[in-house]
């Protein structure tokens, strides 16, 4: 069995990891289509397809109801006309004659047609990704577009367009020491107009679902592309802010701690927890029996296995971009990335100017008193929703905030939303009477939509004013 497993691992290691090249714009080739991916609050979605029919079409012949858009379980580049498994059909809400960029045609004839597709937070096939977990990649779904009246069948993709994702550079980084090697993907954005002018750097850590070896996950899974869009960039002056999005191969919650068998623990496992509890009970017993003051017993704060690798990646970006102001390095993240945010702030308190953890997954019971005192000296802004059942506020953020307040934190903000609902006006509940309600864990939606305020103070406005040493 062990040989079979090793053979499988070796085979998978030979499979090239799926990597999408996102372009700002593209014209579809003959008898092919261009896939458009747009960041939505709930995920990146395919909401538009521009196809090249390979022949001139009259505008009067283009009707949305005539198109059938089939979604396949694998990329259209890998299947023939009759191959693959149909997963679903996407609803075409609008169809019109266009130019190669998808803009309405100024002529009555064109070989290009644009299809607008219905998108919904409850439709998993709104997402372009198949989520092929076994290969640790996200393969794109294949599309087949049929129109009997126009006598066209198109299933070949010639490009993937996402102006938002195309703004950043993606690459790989390898960190190693005497016993370990870590390879991680990352995306980085540097404002083109910054030049030699000093700008801040925002380091943002994704959640557990965006882990792996495909940078499209952190770019689209949590709408992190909003960090380098005009709305949020505007808070950091006319030259904006640089952004770094590291991707964890496994999960930021993986620790340097080992179990008795030499395997690395994750933060959810606390092998010393029972020991600490037993020690406290013994101490309490002797204190009462012999009137001896109870010993000060404290936990040891766990450390992410990826701490050193991430710090070296940040240093690398700073070295390559001397316009980054090292007194304005900000760190944030959601869920497991919120854990990593707190972890990095504890490990490098003098390096980061401020932190903004979202629905953070650092168990309060595992943060030592000395590290709470360390965090209390730093500007911190916590965001979460009370309906979060995945990372319960009463075990994570709430007690941590209380301890920080007791430790004298002077620049501490915390915003607790009652729940997470759609604020765009696009989506309603099943009855159509109230805004659509998302999972309570998804409070990062408010952050990326720039809707987080503590009174009149805006999160990103506050963040932009934090400077190390002041």
Image (tube, rainbow, N blue to C red):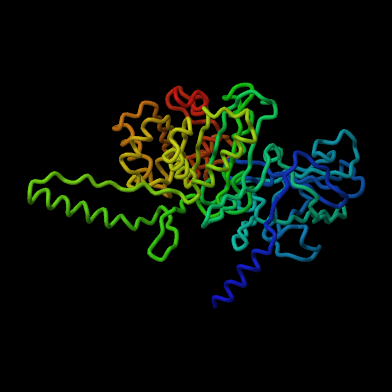
Foreground of the two, 357 or 448: 357
Q: Compared to 133, does 198 lie above or below?
A: above
Task: Indicate the position of residue 158 as horizontal and vertical percent values.
Answer: 80, 50
The residue drawn where x is 40% and y is 41% is 386
- List the single residue furthest toward the left: 290
Outermost residue to the front: 178
Q: Quadrant of the C terminus?
A: top left
Quarter residue 425 falls in: top right
What's the residue at 24%, 54% (across, down)?
277
Decide: is 1 above or below 233.
below
The quadrant of the image that shows the N terminus is bottom right
Asked whether residue 317 appears in the rendered view, the answer is yes
Which residue corresponds to the image point at 61% horizontal and 49% vertical from the top-left? Answer: 217
Residue 15, quarter of the rendered image: bottom right
- Quarter of the figure with residue 103: top right
Above or below 243: residue 365: below
Nearer to us in this view, 117 or 240: 240
Q: Is residue 206 left or right of residue 382?
A: right
The foreground one among 208 and 193 is 193
| 94 left or right of 267 in image | right
The mark total stands at: 0
Residue displayed at 83% across by 46% down: 28
Does residue 434 show up? Answer: no
Foreground residue, 325 or 105? 325
Q: Position of residue 62 (x, y in %)?
A: 83, 45
List x then y, in percent, for residue 235. Answer: 57, 24
Instruction: From the top left corner, tell me how far across and down residue 452 is, in percent.
Output: 48, 31
């Amino acid at each position: 069995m062990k040989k079979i497993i090793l053979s499988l691992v070796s085979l998978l290691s030979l499979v090239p990891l799926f990597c999408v090249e996102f372009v700002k714009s593209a014209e579809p080739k003959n008898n092919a289509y261009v896939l458009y991916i747009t960041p939505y609050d709930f995920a990146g979605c395919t909401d538009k397809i521009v196809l090249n029919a390979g022949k001139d079409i009259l505008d009067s012949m283009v009707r949305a109801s005539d198109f059938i858009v089939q979604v396949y379980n694998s990329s259209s580049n890998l299947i023939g006309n009759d191959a693959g498994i149909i997963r679903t059909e996407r609803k075409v809400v609008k169809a019109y004659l266009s130019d190669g960029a998808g803009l309405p045609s100024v002529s009555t004839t064109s070989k290009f047609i644009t299809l607008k597709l219905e998108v919904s937070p409850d439709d998993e096939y709104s997402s372009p990704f198949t989520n092929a977990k076994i290969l640790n990649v996200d393969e794109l779904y294949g599309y087949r577009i049929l129109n009997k009246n126009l006598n066209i069948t198109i299933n070949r993709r010639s490009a993937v367009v996402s102006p938002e994702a195309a703004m950043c550079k993606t690459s790989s980084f390898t960190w190693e020491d005497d016993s370990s090697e870590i390879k991680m993907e990352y995306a980085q954005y540097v404002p083109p107009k910054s030049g030699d002018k000093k700008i801040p750097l925002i380091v943002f850590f994704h959640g557990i679902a965006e882990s792996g070896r495909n940078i499209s996950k952190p770019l689209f899974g949590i709408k992190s592309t909003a960090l380098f869009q005009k709305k949020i960039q505007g808070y950091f002056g006319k030259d904006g802010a640089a952004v770094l999005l590291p991707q964890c191969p496994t999960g930021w919650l993986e620790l340097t701690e080992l179990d008795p068998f030499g395997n690395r623990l994750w933060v959810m496992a606390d092998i010393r927890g029972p020991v600490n509890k037993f020690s406290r009970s013994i101490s309490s017993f002797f204190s009462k029996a012999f009137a001896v003051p109870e010993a000060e017993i404290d936990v040891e704060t766990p450390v992410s296995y990826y701490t050193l690798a991430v710090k070296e990646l940040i240093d690398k970006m700073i070295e390559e971009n001397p316009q980054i102001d090292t007194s304005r390095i900000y760190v944030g993240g959601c869920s497991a990335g919120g854990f990593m945010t707190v972890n990095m702030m504890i490990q490098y308190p003098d390096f980061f100017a401020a932190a903004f953890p979202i629905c953070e997954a650092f168990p309060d019971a595992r943060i030592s008193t000395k590290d709470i005192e360390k965090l209390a000296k730093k500007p911190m802004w916590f965001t979460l929703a009370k309906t979060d059942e995945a990372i319960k506020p009463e075990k994570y953020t709430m007690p941590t905030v209380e301890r920080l307040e007791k430790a004298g934190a002077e620049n501490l903000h915390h915003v607790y939303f009652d729940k997470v609902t759609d604020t765009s006006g696009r989506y309603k509940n099943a009855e159509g009477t109230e805004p659509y309600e998302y999972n309570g864990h998804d409070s990062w939606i408010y952050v990326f939509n720039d809707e987080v305020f503590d009174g009149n103070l805006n999160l990103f406005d506050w963040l932009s004013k934090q400077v190390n040493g002041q």
